[in-house]
Amino acid sequence: MTRHSFTCIEGHTEGMPVRMVVDGAPTLAGETMNECREDFVSRYDWIRRSLMLEPRGHSHMSGTVLYPPLSAESDMSLLFIETSGCLPMCGHASIGSISFALETGLVHPKLPGTVVIDVPAGQLTAKYEMDGSTVTSVRLTNVPSFLLYRDVEVKHPKFGQLAVDIAYGGNFYPIVEVQPNFPGCEHFTPEMLLEWGRQMQVLVNEALDVVHPDDPDIRGVRHCMWTGAPVSNDADARAVVIAGDSLIDRSPCGTGTSARVAQRHAKGLLDDGETFIHQSLIGSCFVGRVESTTRLKSGLEAVLPSIEGRAWITGRAEHYVDDSQPYAHGFGLQEFSW
Ligand code: PYC
């Protein structure tokens, strides 16, 4: 019997699960977190599957592995593990992991109030506030985010003709705003939006080559954002984000909010410094903001968005993966046919 053991801090960011591995993960080869991510994907993807999929996880699980800082100026590194793979960037998981690492004393930032993290998408800075030993807010400044395509015409099997914006905020998002053929996410169940969001990913990938202008390795759409009216007066807009085949984000989605901040800024709907309160499926919020404007190397206009949210620890767990057990390395129901 080979039993592997992973110690995890468990919790959530604005309702979305974050399982942060703090012990048991392998040392990775690479000088950047992106190289480490490639090493993890090629040699250790079974760890992601085991901890994210059933029976230890579920369709909407999300997590990270906490690694030591890679560079002299950073405080911690994160690898993102999701049901759909290893994303280069995940906003809610960053906010959660920063909070958990600070609250458990695993990370002591060089400059109190500011934490610098290495992630596969690059180096990011977050400001945080604490009340005693509790982290009460994390504001993370994300990667340069931009609107790549506006008003792309897509013929969706449920809605017919839709105009969709494609924006990047660490991942690419087709953003479906309210329009004559789409009355808003609040009119549909999450399961319907999941199914139609999967179809949207396929339609967009068939119609367009969605590629990051500065990095041809970042390509393709694996998410979808359905928007709608907020459920409370203190929010500006609502979004239900679908990731991969099975995941419905319970939070407003950090990279999705960044993409929407960039989209709204490019369309003249959000000024520099103005806040955008983005509400999730379950009513929780991230506060987005344009911190500054920039240009990609290719010349495309972009923004540096920040997202602010809060996370809570719900437990600590030791997960065993015994290679001899059935389903040891996890499964998703969509992998079976009937
Ligand atoms: O918060 O960036 C995010 C995210 C990506 C996929 C699910 N959540």
Image (spheres, rainbow, N blue to C red):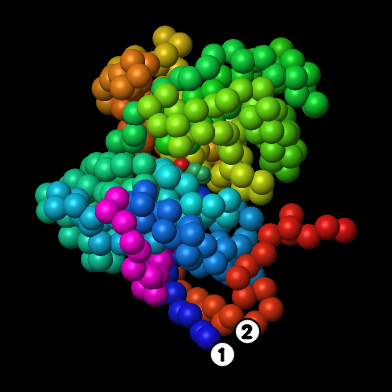
Q: Secondary structure at mark 1?
A: loop
Q: In the rendered view of the protein, which quadrant contains the N terminus? A: bottom right
Q: Earlier in the sequence, mark 2 or mark 1?
A: 1
Residue 245 versus residue 41 in the image, above or below: above
Residue 119's place in the image compared with 264, above or below, is: below
Q: Which mark is residue 1?
A: 1
- The three-letter code of the residue at mark 1 reads Met
> Of all residues shown, which one is farthest toward the top?
268
Q: Is residue 5 visible?
A: yes
**Region of the chain picked out in magenta, as a range:** 19-32
- Residue 146 inside the magenta-drawn segment: no
Q: Which residue corresponds to the image point at 52% horizontal and 79% vertical from the top-left?
A: 320
Bin the neighbour count of mark 2 within 10 Å (Cα to Cα): few under 14, some 14-19, many 20 and up.
few
Residue 161 placed where, x, y %? Answer: 74, 15
Q: Secondary structure at mark 2?
A: loop
247 to 206, vertically: above or below: below
Residue drawn where x is 63% and y is 67% of the image: 330
* 255 with respect to 114 (left or right): right
Q: Main secondary structure of the magenta part?
A: loop
Task: Please report contact status of discs 2 and 1: CB closer than 8 Å, yes or no.
Answer: yes
Q: Residue at x 74, y 55 (%)?
A: 334
Give the residue number, with chain letter if any, for mark 2: 324
Quadrant where the C terminus is found in the figure: bottom right
